[in-house]
Amino acid sequence: MDNRQLEDYNKVIESLGIKYIKANNIKLIQPLKIADYYDSENTILVLKKGEIRFGENNQLVKPGQSLFIPGGTTTSITYGYGEATELSNDEIANRENEFFKTEPGGSGGLRGVGMDNFDYIAFEANIFDTVNFFKTLDITPFVMDSKKILQIVEDILEEEEGRTEGRNRVISLKSEHLVVEVIRYLIDNQLFVEQLATNSTYFKDPRLLDMFDHIKANLGGDLSNKVLATVANVSEDYVGQYFKMLTGINPQDYIEYQRMELALDLLRTTKKSIRAIGSEIGYKDTAYFCRRFKMMFGIPAGKMRRRETLMNV
């Protein structure tokens, strides 16, 4: 890698806002297949014992390997050996306890003993705290063989369990280290390097950054192409093409994605009504908001609020 490439990668890494979401050790009670697995956050599954398969070709994850699933990506995933019950991402929300047993944080050397199990960690890695970095690369789930990544996940789980002084700070720092190691793994193994190179160039464009900032600050307001054109100082006819050229997604799809991400956060962290949340993010028609939410996440907004996800601490 030459110095210019190194500098570009460093700028991308420095632009990332990294946020730890949750981690657990998950024990498998019986085999399960989720044909349309989806999560808005980036996730890493570290297989301790048993078998995981994913994708159209049922690619195998072996014990000691980790599976990286970029946020916003839909994939097929099968846990365990033998004949598996097949459920949708929506259906599993009501039946988690039939298939998974969760343990907050870690249990040190006890993990990997007994039932088939895997460590799970979810995190955000957003460019300028706005757009999911791994989503912009348009990458598919992939397997990693990295002892460093395994150790970092293990460390985070131990911190979760310990609940000692400085715990949140340590988890935050280790989460940043985890994301850096994933990016290093991509580069070292020549995975998605063209997307990485393109990404490092595009996200230095000041007009694009201005649009990101404006969208983030005005998710409940008017974000038409006319408004974005004014922000970026380009023509209304060109702004959609310009945005898509730099990001790989048209601006209105990106805006809806950001609105739904905010709605998901509000559902998880507040007691606001679904109507109020829809209105806050720019949807006057609650029924339409609910339809779009279910289309994006595969789960109705009300069910998302009610359920305690299998990965929650």
Image (tube, rainbow, N blue to C red):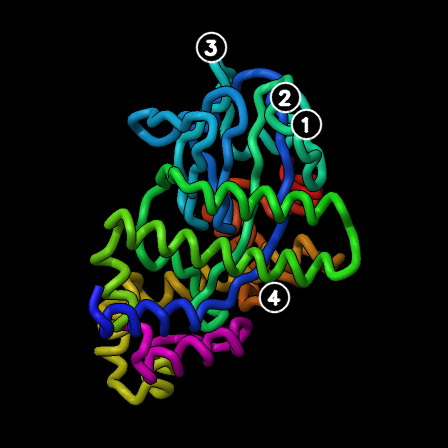
Q: Nearer the viewer, mark 4 or mark 3?
A: 3
Using the numbered discs, state the Cα–Cα distance from disc 4 to disc 1 in whole angstroms. 47 Å
Q: Are marks 1 and 2 in contact (CB under 8 Å)?
A: yes
Q: Which amino acid, by three-letter code, is at mark 1?
A: Leu
Amino acid at circle 4: Ser
- What whole-number distance in Å separates the C-alpha atoms at marks 4 and 3? 46 Å
Res 76 → quadrant: top left
**Front residue of 81 and 163:** 163
Q: Is residue 64 left or right of residue 122?
A: left
Residue position for label 2 = 113
Residue at point 46% right, 79% down?
Answer: 213
**Numbered tag placed on residue 110 in the rendering:** 1
Give the secondary structure at mark 4: helix
The residue stretch that appears in magenta: 202-225
Which of the 4 image quadrants contains residue 19? bottom right
Nearest the viewer among 30 and 112 is: 112
Earlier in the chain: of badge 3 and badge 1, it is: 3
Which residue position is annotated with label 3?
82
Q: Earlier in the sequence, mark 4 or mark 2?
A: 2
Please say whether residue 197 is one of the residues in the magenta stretch. no
